[in-house]
Image (cartoon, grey):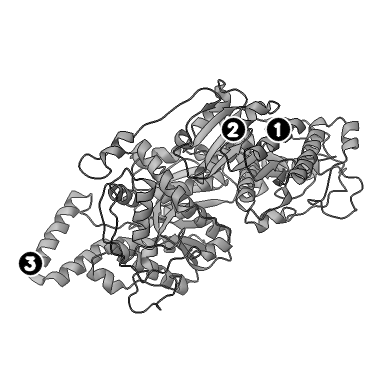
Amino acid sequence: MAAIGDSSAGGGGGTVCVTGGSGFIGSWLVRLLLDRGYTVHATVKNLQDESETKHLQALDGADTRLRLFQMDLLDPASVTLAVDGAHGVIHVASPVILNPTQDPEATTRFLHNLIRFNQSCGHDRLMLLLLLHACRPAVSGALNVLRAAKDCGIARVVMVSSQTAMVPIPGEWPAGKVIDDDCWADVELLKKKQFWYNVSKILAEKAAWDFAAKEGLQLVVLHPGLVLGPMLTPSPTASLGLLLQILGGQKFDIEDFFVGCVDVRDVARSLIVLYENTTAQGRHLCIESIERLADFHDKLAELYPEFPVYRIQEDKQDWVVRSKTASKKLIDLGVQFIPLDKTIRDTVDCLRSKVPCPEREGPSRAFRAKCGKRSSKKMAAIGDSSAGGGAGTVCVTGGSGFIGSWLVRLLLDRGYTVHATVKNLQDEGETKHLEALDGANTRLRLFQMDLLDPASVTPAVDGAHGGELLQPAVSGALNVLRVAKDCGVARVVMVSSQTAMVPIPEWPAGKVIDDDCWADVELLKKKQFWYNVSKTLAEKAAWDFASKEGLQLVVLNPGLVLGPMLTPSPTASLGLLLQILGGQKFDIEDFYVGCVDVRDVAQSLIVLYENTSAQGRHLCIESIERLIDFHDKLAELNPEFPIFRIQEDKQGWVVRSKAASKKLIDLGVQFIPFDKTIRDTVDCLRSKGYI
């Protein structure tokens, strides 16, 4: 069959085709797209091969929003089948055949041709045959994808090329100038050195640009450096194999084109940023920093002195001008690159946990002896963060909850070590979904904490460099802030709520609610909205403490939080949605002003944590709307449910707005559309048996 899965229940109009979806970059891209609520058409070579499909089918959201297509890039019909029905294409796959093909008959023909051409026509003709055999699939494959996109009415394609399509450029590039998006590698030099992968990338990209120009197709291209990072795939790719061999003492002559590394998670994020920012154009170098091969070897040797890493004595890369801002176009679009130290550590941790140790070459005995080692301390904490991402340790209170679990997941995805607090370490309902997260085995520690017991707060915060605060009551919030200060943590990001902003009777009529709003506590007490009161008082107490003690505090104020859950059971906001779907009506017009996706809440917290210039309060909401709008949208999207239709709009004081969270938008947060959030929430509740 041609496809597995059904996207009919997916996230509205947001369907993206990802070619090469089972690969190192592709699988991370599929995961992050699913996390953002997209429906994904992912292509694989063989639907019957579990090593290509199983890790994709295990992703959150895959059961309802992922379709797998068996595709041969050289077969236009199979390409069209995958692209059809998508609204955009991200072309990751690049078939480069450097070894005989898997087809025995084709292999025989290929070898016979090589021998015959070499004997009769000499080395130049042999090179020509190698060029055609190695590079034709990449060029033809790229063109087949672009043609299919155009034929299916898709106006915009994001394509993965490589930094190897930019260098080497001997004698042409000005000395002392940093490599940038205008660089094109010297194809003839690469052919001479038989770097066929590099040649294929250049030819495929040039052919793609020519096609796009002629056919009026919007094309955007990403050029990653050497891609490292944790893998979702069951076995390492070429770049991870290269790292393993360097750790084992080997030296590769790649000074002609090595200019630095990038984390696979940043590659996937960059592709999504380019896809979602329709103003992005041209080529985009994607690299944490430009550096030399000697720097890379030195960094590996510094981080892993137990490995026999070869120390390069002669630096042959004077032409490489080091730079931390070579990917400025992506940085300006909001991409924040994971530091190289983190990427290397996370890669090695992942390889330790997944890869059988080589016997003859590769990592040393010290590496092999350490493979699979784990420690577990069941006291106040579970796990061991010593192997985590360097200095990047973040404490997340309320880590097992709806928002907290997504925050932990995204922090682990970004390479952080996480101290997450739970109420009861013996309750699998609080711990199991966290321990199942990628990276949890080496970079997650779970702490049992009572927010009202300062002694239990200290172990969780100690050793962390930032704090994310969830479920704060006044005393609990102050305990965490005090402990953060005592442990030398300078900056805390705290979750409050939009309910700490409204109702506000004295707010000027016709003015959009913003970060200056504070809810009327006396009115809330009168109406016995105690949750709202606690949020308001806790936030005010936190601001007072931070002001007196000189602590940097940043606060996020989310609206009604919906979205797919990682937790085993629904939280209050999802319970509210379930009851509204069942026909109930709640009198929450006094403070309801809109919804936000849990994934955007978690992403916003990380953005606030990583942007140290961010200050003050931040309303976090997809759009300001009224309760009647919410009920109408639910009824429109889910006509099979007996949703109560509100007849009288009592929220004349709510001024609708799509830009109420401008501070977060300016920091790069792109909110998942409300329709997507509702669909994904309902799909999740269905899949878990709550609908």
Between disc 1 and disc 3, the foreground one is: 1
Disc number placed over residue 119 in the picture, else none: 3
Residue extending furthest toward the left: 119
Contact (Cβ within 8 Å) of mark 2 with mark 1 = no
Residue at the spot of label 1: 479
Q: Quadrant of the N terminus?
A: top left
Q: Position of residue 460 (x, y in %)?
A: 59, 32
Tell me which label, 2 or 1, sits earlier in the chain: 2
Report how many numbered discs are placed on residues in the image. 3
Residue at the spot of label 2: 460
Residue shown at 43%/41% (left/top)? Answer: 56
Residue 280 seen: yes
Q: Secondary structure at mark 1?
A: helix
Q: Between 115 and 306, which is closer to the camera in this rendering?
A: 306
Q: Amino acid at mark 2?
A: Ala
- Drawn side of residue 579 relative to residue 375, left or right: right
Q: Quadrant of the C terminus?
A: top right
